[in-house]
Image: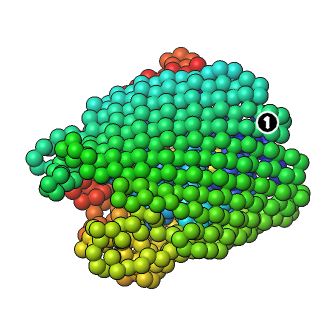
């Protein structure tokens, strides 16, 4: 669904409604403008208000709707791991537990937001998003904010993945798609939306299923395929009450059914006849007011999760969680050169696993100064105060800067950011150490909060011809890291000392002749525990290379993607497989609105292991048809 009436590019100094900001991003992709012009693209992840990318000192990656569709991945983690500093591990196929690590930090430090809703699961051992339950259907844009981002999102946010669904075009539009492929995989998806003067809406849905493959090589008795089913429905509606006042509501429902290997039956004997179910219901309402010098947004969201685990068809564990959030974000603009962003959020999380039922609240208040000097330098400085029911008060802060100048038929940007944060032990971590399954030393450990700090500095050059180059150095460290005892399985321990993650990110995009374009990224990431050993499941080297082709008529699209991972270790320090994967995709528009497409994943049928004893997918072909109106 593309807007037939293209919006005018926003003024770089004016705060705009999110709807307009995202429409400009789509316009830039549609018209194929230069990389230099894309520095004017507006992002909202850095400070929760729209800011041109050239003024953002933090490290941000943007995935457009066009790239999401062309890469073709059905699951969000597969899409995200093609980006700089993003690594993932999976426990044996779609729907299995998946951990995503940005710059070497655990997945529960990454906040995932879908149309303003924090989709974290509070019933998990650590409050974290269930990434294996997230499909790419209906997503039009992803912003990946790397590094400590506790100022605007909560002091424990070590990175942010901000997901937006498709922006409705004028009038009524929509689309349907069906895809099938190896392992009995199939997905039926669709969306319909519209924009009628002051009212707009979008409804999207997907039904995904796969027979899967044997999740673990330790399954020597059943040796069966471990399948997965997912049904996702997402709806959003907005009403522009006036030119300056907007109301919006979002409703989302995800249901997943998954088979896996390695659990215990009622007699506490190991079995591979394991299943789990996941259900998450979430919603959000918001009201936004934009005036000449002030803008305000008040929002309330609620997210409930239920997980049930079965062994040989008998329930052996269940957990429920809820996350309620009331937030206010405001901005005052004195002039193009000065603005203040401020806000308050109150969050309540709860967990009930049958033996432990508890809730707690945390309130945060923050403010950020944004100063712009001579149209070249942007400086931000912010402070946040959090008050946690269990662990009291904590102050965190963030500083950032971006300096731009013309250079060699392009624009040079120097950027840098520094931030701090803390993470309180999760309700599950606390309850486990106080429960019947804990043993010394964990049962004798009184968990305290983790503290963190990190910085990055980088340089970006974007040319009028479409060349984009970026290099960033980052260094992050966590004090008193909480980890599970993988040796004695006694519970959760606190590692005294610093856990560090240091690295370099290189990103490049280059237009070639005859409709070809090449892009890629490379990440070197050294992670160390307080003992000096490498932290597990964190590849020291990650690389992605993509060659894309677009025909002069835009009817034919071809893509070739190479992804490599090297020098990772497991929890015992044993080396994991280095691997290189080749993916290919192609699409052909038969006539306006109707497109056929195909995708070949792991084209060279590489055999590799991400986690010991867990299998990975072999060569897999998929094909589908998509119709948009």
x and y percentages locating residue 588 in the rendered image: 48, 24
**Residue nearest the viewer, comparing 117 with 619:** 117
Q: Residue at x 53, y 62 (%)?
A: 360
x and y percentages locating residue 369 in the rendered image: 78, 66
- Give SS at disc 1: loop
x and y percentages locating residue 395 in the rendered image: 65, 74
Q: Is 435 located above or below residue 65 in the figure?
A: below
Q: Is 462 located above or below residue 491 in the figure?
A: above
- The residue indicated by pointer 1 is 8
**Residue nearest the viewer, comparing 166 with 294:** 294
Residue 269, by quadrant, is bottom left
**Residue nearest the viewer, comparing 466 with 181:** 181
Residue 192, by quadrant, is top right
For the C terminus, the quadrant is top right
Residue 411 seen anywhere in this rendered image of the structure: no
For the N terminus, the quadrant is top right
> For the image shown, how many numbered marks are present on the structure?
1
Residue 237 seen anywhere in this rendered image of the structure: yes
Q: Residue at x 70, y 65 (%)?
A: 365
Give the farthest residue toward the left: 221
Q: Residue at x 31, y 41 (%)?
A: 258
Whether residue 401 sits left or right of residue 301 in the image: it is: right
Q: Residues within 10 Å of mark 1 (few under 14, many from 20)?
A: few
Whether residue 503 sits left or right of residue 397 in the image: it is: left
**Residue nearest the viewer, comparing 574 with 403:** 574
Q: Is 534 located above or below residue 538 in the figure?
A: below
x and y percentages locating residue 433 in the rendered image: 36, 71
Give the farthest residue toward the top: 591
Whether residue 192 sits left or right of residue 306 in the image: it is: right
Q: Residue at x 61, y 29 (%)?
A: 202
């Amino acid at each position: 669904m593309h807007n037939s009436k293209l919006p005018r590019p926003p003024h770089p100094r004016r705060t705009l409604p999110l709807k307009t900001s995202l429409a400009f991003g789509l316009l830039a992709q549609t018209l194929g403008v230069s990389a230099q012009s894309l520095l004017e693209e507006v992002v909202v992840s850095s400070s929760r208000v729209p800011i041109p990318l050239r003024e953002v000192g933090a490290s941000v990656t943007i995935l457009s709707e066009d790239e999401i569709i062309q890469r073709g991945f059905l699951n969000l983690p597969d899409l995200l791991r093609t980006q700089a500093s993003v690594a993932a591990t999976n426990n044996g196929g779609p729907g299995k537990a998946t951990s995503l690590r940005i710059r070497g930090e655990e997945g529960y430090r990454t906040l995932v937001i879908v149309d303003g809703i924090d989709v974290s699961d509070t019933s998990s051992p650590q409050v974290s998003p269930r990434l294996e339950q997230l499909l790419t259907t209906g997503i039009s844009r992803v912003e990946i904010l790397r590094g400590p981002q506790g100022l605007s999102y909560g002091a424990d946010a070590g990175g942010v993945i901000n997901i937006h669904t498709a922006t409705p075009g004028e009038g009524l539009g929509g689309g349907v798609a069906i895809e099938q492929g190896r392992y009995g995989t199939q997905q039926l998806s669709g969306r319909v939306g519209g924009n009628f003067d002051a009212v707009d809406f979008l409804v999207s849905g997907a039904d995904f299923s796969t027979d899967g493959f044997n999740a673990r090589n330790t399954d020597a008795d059943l040796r069966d395929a471990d399948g997965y089913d997912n049904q996702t429905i997402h709806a959003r509606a907005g009403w522009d009450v006036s030119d300056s006042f907007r109301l919006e509501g979002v409703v989302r429902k995800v249901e997943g059914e998954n088979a896996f290997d390695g659990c215990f039956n009622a007699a506490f004997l190991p079995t591979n006849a394991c299943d789990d179910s996941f259900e998450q219901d979430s919603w959000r309402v918001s009201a936004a007011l934009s005036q000449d010098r002030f803008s305000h947004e008040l929002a309330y969201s609620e997210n409930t999760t239920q997980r049930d685990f079965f062994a040989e068809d008998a329930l052996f564990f269940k957990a429920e969680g809820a996350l309620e959030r009331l937030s206010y974000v405001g901005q005052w603009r004195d002039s193009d050169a000065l603005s203040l962003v401020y806000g308050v959020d109150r969050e309540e999380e709860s967990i009930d696993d049958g033996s432990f039922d508890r809730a707690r609240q945390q309130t945060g208040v923050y403010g950020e100064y944004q100063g712009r000097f001579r149209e070249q330098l942007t400086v931000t400085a912010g402070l946040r105060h959090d008050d946690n029911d269990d662990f009291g008060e904590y102050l965190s802060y963030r500083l950032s800067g971006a300096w731009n100048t013309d250079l060699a038929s392009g624009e040079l940007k120097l950027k840098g950011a520094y931030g701090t944060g803390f993470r309180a032990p999760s309700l599950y971590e606390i309850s486990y150490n106080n429960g019947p399954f804990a043993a010394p030393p964990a049962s004798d450990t009184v968990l305290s909060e983790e503290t963190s700090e990190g910085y990055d500095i980088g340089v970006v050059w974007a040319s009028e011809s479409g060349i984009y180059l970026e290099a960033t150095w980052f260094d992050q460290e966590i004090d008193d890291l909480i980890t599970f005892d993988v040796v004695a399985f006694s519970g959760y321990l606190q590692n005294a000392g610093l856990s560090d993650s240091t690295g370099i990110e290189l990103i490049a995009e280059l237009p070639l002749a005859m409709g070809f374009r090449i892009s890629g990224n490379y990440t070197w990431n050294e992670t160390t525990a307080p003992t000096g050993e490498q932290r597990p499941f964190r590849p020291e080297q990650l690389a992605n290379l993509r060659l894309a082709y677009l025909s002069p008529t835009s009817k034919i699209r071809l893509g070739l993607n190479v992804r490599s991972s090297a020098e990772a270790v497991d929890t015992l320090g044993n080396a994991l497989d280095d691997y290189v994967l080749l993916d290919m995709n192609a699409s052909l528009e038969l006539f306006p609105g109707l497109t056929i497409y195909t995708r070949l994943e792991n084209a060279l049928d590489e055999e590799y292991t991400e986690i010991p004893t867990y299998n990975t997918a072999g060569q897999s072909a998929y094909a589908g048809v998509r119709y948009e109106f």
